[in-house]
Image: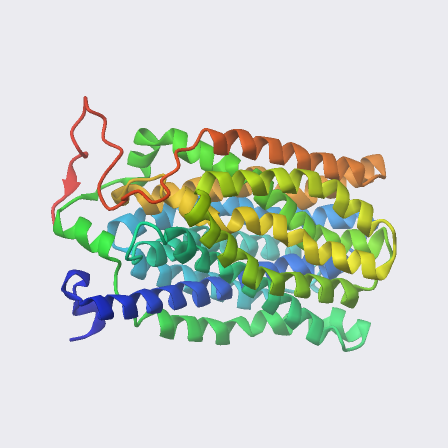
Amino acid sequence: MAPADVSPTSLTASEHQIQLRRAVVASTIGTAIEWYDFFLYSTVTGLVFAKLFFPNSDHWVGTLEAFAIYAVGFVARPVGAAIFGHYGDRIGRKSTLIATLLLMGLATAAVAVVPTYATAGIWGAVILTVLRFIQGVGVGGEWGGSVLMSMEWARTNHSRGFVASWPQFGVPCGLFMANLAVLAFSQMSGEQFLAWGWRIPFALSLILVAIGLYIRLGILETPVFSALVANQKIERTPILEVIRRQPKEIILSAFARMAEQAPFYIFTAFIFSYGTGALHVERDFLLTAVLTASVVSFFSIPFFGYLSDRIGRKAMYMIGALTTGVFGFIYFGMVNTGVYWIIFFAIVLSLIPHDMMYGPQAALIAESFTGRLRYSGASLGYQLASVIAGGPAPLIAAWLFGRYQSSHAIAAYIAACAVCSLIATAMMTDYTGRDISNEYDADPAMPAHSPALKL
């Protein structure tokens, strides 16, 4: 039988274990490719986009304009969450993940041929904005499916934090590949890199997409979604239903991410414009430091996901949020010394507090939503943070520094984000070790589930 014809319920224990490994690998590799595409844009934004698309602006104004386009991708992510969350809860996790990979990869490859201001004037920035929006839609639908593809194959209730952390592992992988690609091609002369060298990493996205598609086409649908189909519990309008039934979980998921997402893009995107512009540090040095930080995350993300299975999702997450709030001041204190080895050490350390949250985050958010609404709810809650945290973060950081000429304001912003996350996480329900295969959002005064699609 073809893989699509096999029912998860008919698998033996060893076959189930094989499918779990395949699902984890497919989710992790696919997510790494998607985040390569997304981070490639963020890395190049801080290095060349202000010069190529806004050449008539001074350094900091051009940086603000470039990061404004960068933020468009984050605004688009909730749109992608709504679109693909709907289909992920309607037609399945697997099919939806294939669509998100294609959309993201093709949009990224198209960036390689966008004309600059010198060629097309303002239309170059307009085209770049449209492609960035498409990128955001694709990545907005990717995360929820990748996490569920792994988590819903987990064999026990006491390993979900570790299993669900592997798609999160795709983030440092994508960050590593994006920075490595830019570092490799930045070895050419500055004029060559600005003229055409920066385009090559975007074009290489097509190769990665082909690899990702090959892997994802060979996996099975998750047991949880297969059971929903068998029991005829597929919602007609899952995105509307989850907003109606679980609005609290959506809002809390978004605010819980404030301490994780905003600092992350300050540490990995804004640092390029801050480092080269304010500290006068070499571009390749910063790329190497962020590259090294991403390697550390290869180990820290799954470790903290595993640790959340032991001490509880909320406890682990809140420890990370508190650490991040304090570390922002330490981070800028270190990088502002101007001493290269201290700057390098600060950048390498910067992702560890982030990983304390990012490791358990996938399970923490996904477990908050009942099975038939999980793709929609988890995606929407996760991606709404892009509008309030990730997207604006480099823009806010650049504005704060331009306004106050001090990094203390940026560190205070990070601390404020940490406080928001601590409050939101404290209000969430911790499902560590609990069974999530059954529906658990039913209101006693209402039917067990709304009228469902009969298959």
Quadrant of residue 428 in the image?
top left
Q: How many marks?
A: 0
Looking at the image, which residue sits at the far front?
Answer: 310
Quadrant of residue 298 in the image?
bottom right
Lateral position of residue 109 relative to residue 333, left or right:
left
| Residue nearest the viewer, comparing 352 with 366 | 352
State the image coordinates of residue 58 (x, y, percent, origin top left): 84, 49
Lateral position of residue 133 relative to residue 236, left or right:
right
State the image coordinates of residue 364 (x, y, percent, origin top left): 42, 43
Q: Is residue 124 above or below residue 245?
A: below
| Residue nearest the viewer, comparing 90 with 366 | 366
Question: Residue 196, can we see it?
Answer: no
Looking at the image, which residue sits at the far top?
Answer: 445
| Residue nearest the viewer, comparing 137 with 284 | 284
Question: Residue 153, can we see it?
Answer: yes
**Residue at the image point whose x is 62% and y is 35% from the top:** 417
**Residue at the image point whose x is 76% and y is 76% from the top:** 187
**Residue at the image point whose x is 67% and y is 60% from the top:** 43
Quadrant of residue 338 in the image?
bottom right
State the image coordinates of residue 181 (x, y, percent, origin top left): 64, 72
State the image coordinates of residue 257 (x, y, percent, origin top left): 53, 40
Q: How is the image coloured?
A: rainbow
| Residue nearest the viewer, comparing 435 with 5 | 435
**Residue at the image point whose x is 60% and y is 62% from the top:** 175
Q: Split into 4 quadrants, where in the image is the N terminus?
A: bottom left
Lateral position of residue 263 relative to residue 303, left or right:
right
Lateral position of residue 90 relative to residue 97, left or right:
left
